[in-house]
Image: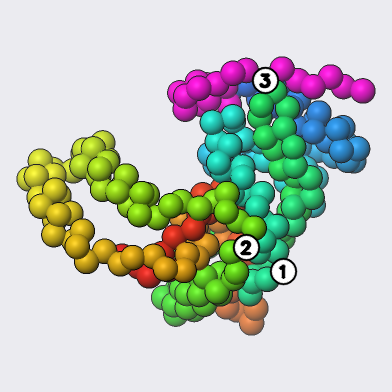
């Protein structure tokens, strides 16, 4: 039996990004997960993009490893994967195994077939894009209608979340090099909208991952349609209305 790998203690994104360059160590960690769960010894392919460490294991599984300071993303991914599976208009991965070693949590899930939307979006004609956006709206509405029992761990405490977003708004836009003229207008604008911010009564599941890199599409009769949704690492409870 393989010993549990000793993964490093990492406390910052800078340390983490450097560690992610150690491909042999990453692959060794994935292999140990494979052996832990007595999975077939199939090829591993590391995805080049993404916040966390993600491997395709053969053609049917995905192994996702989270650094310790992304524990909240692990919890969101694990809970929401279980919660939404077979309940939406589109396919979502099935959670198969989860656990941790050296304080690094991981998930093993099924791999969906399909084409990433980001590889087709730019070349897609306007009519097909309109169809995709209509399907996206229906999907979001459907997810908002799901019950939220058993998902307390992803509660964002909406009002506190909004206060935090407001407090860091100027700094965030400074980091994006917004002009000084516009930066100076932000505090007054935020003060003007605070009184009309809606209160949350019944929270719904929210995710910021409705992006082309997280949708799988399938072509039918020459038209691309949304066929799968992946990545629930930033899912949380929140307000269904757009602010």
Tell whether 46 sits left or right of 4: left
| Alpha carbons under labels 3 and 2: distance apart | 34 Å
Point out which mark residue 46 bears: none
Image spot of residue 123 (x, y percent): 47, 65
The foreground one among 108 and 193 is 193
Image quadrant for the C terminus? bottom left
Residue 132 can be seen in this image:
no
Q: Residue at x 62, y 35 (%)?
A: 66
Q: Which residue is mark 1?
A: 86
Q: Residues within 10 Å of mark 2 (few under 14, many from 20)?
A: few
Image spot of residue 171 (x, y percent): 23, 37
Q: Please, what secondary structure does the residue beneath circle 3 have?
A: loop
Q: Which residue is mark 3?
A: 7
Q: Where are the magenta residues, as a range?
A: 1-20
Vertical position of residue 95 compared to residue 141: above or below: above
Chain-order first, disc 3 or disc 1: 3
Image quadrant for the N terminus? top right
Q: Which residue is mark 2?
A: 149
Vertical position of residue 69 compared to residue 18: above or below: below
Q: Do the residues bearing badges 3 and 1 touch, measured as CB atoms within 8 Å?
A: no
Q: Residue at x 67, y 20 (%)?
A: 7
**Disc 2 or disc 1, which is closer to the eye?**
2
Chain-order first, disc 3 or disc 2: 3
Q: How many marks?
A: 3
Q: Residue at x 43, y 52 (%)?
A: 157
Image spot of residue 64 (x, y percent): 67, 40
Q: Residue at x 9, y 45 (%)?
A: 184
Q: Please, what secondary structure does the residue beneath circle 1 have?
A: loop
Q: Do the residues bearing badges 3 and 2 touch, measured as CB atoms within 8 Å?
A: no
Image spot of residue 137 (x, y percent): 47, 74
**Would you say residue 13 sits in the magenta stretch?**
yes
């Amino acid at each position: 039996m393989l010993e549990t790998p000793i993964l490093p203690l990492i406390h910052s994104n800078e340390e983490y990004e450097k560690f992610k360059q150690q491909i042999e160590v990453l692959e060794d960690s994935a292999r140990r997960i494979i052996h832990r769960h007595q999975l077939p010894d199939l090829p591993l392919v590391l995805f080049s993009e993404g916040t966390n460490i993600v491997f395709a294991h053969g053609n049917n599984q995905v192994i996702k490893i989270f650094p310790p300071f992304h524990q909240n993303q692990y919890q969101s991914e694990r809970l929401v994967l279980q919660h939404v599976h077979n309940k939406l208009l589109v396919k979502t991965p099935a959670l198969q195994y989860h656990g941790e070693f050296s304080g690094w949590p991981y998930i093993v899930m099924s791999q969906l077939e399909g084409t990433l939307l980001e590889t087709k979006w730019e070349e897609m004609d306007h009519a097909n894009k309109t169809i995709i956006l209509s399907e996206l709206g229906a999907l979001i509405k459907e997810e908002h209608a799901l019950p939220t029992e058993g998902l307390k761990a992803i509660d964002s405490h909406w009002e506190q979340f909004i206060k935090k977003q407001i407090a860091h708004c100027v700094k965030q836009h400074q980091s994006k090099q917004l002009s000084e003229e516009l930066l100076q207008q932000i505090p007054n604008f935020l003060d003007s909208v605070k009184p009309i911010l809606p209160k949350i009564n019944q929270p719904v599941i929210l995710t910021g991952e409705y992006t082309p890199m997280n949708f799988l599409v399938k072509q039918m009769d020459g038209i691309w349609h949304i066929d799968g949704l992946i990545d629930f690492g930033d899912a949380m409870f929140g307000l269904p209305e757009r602010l």
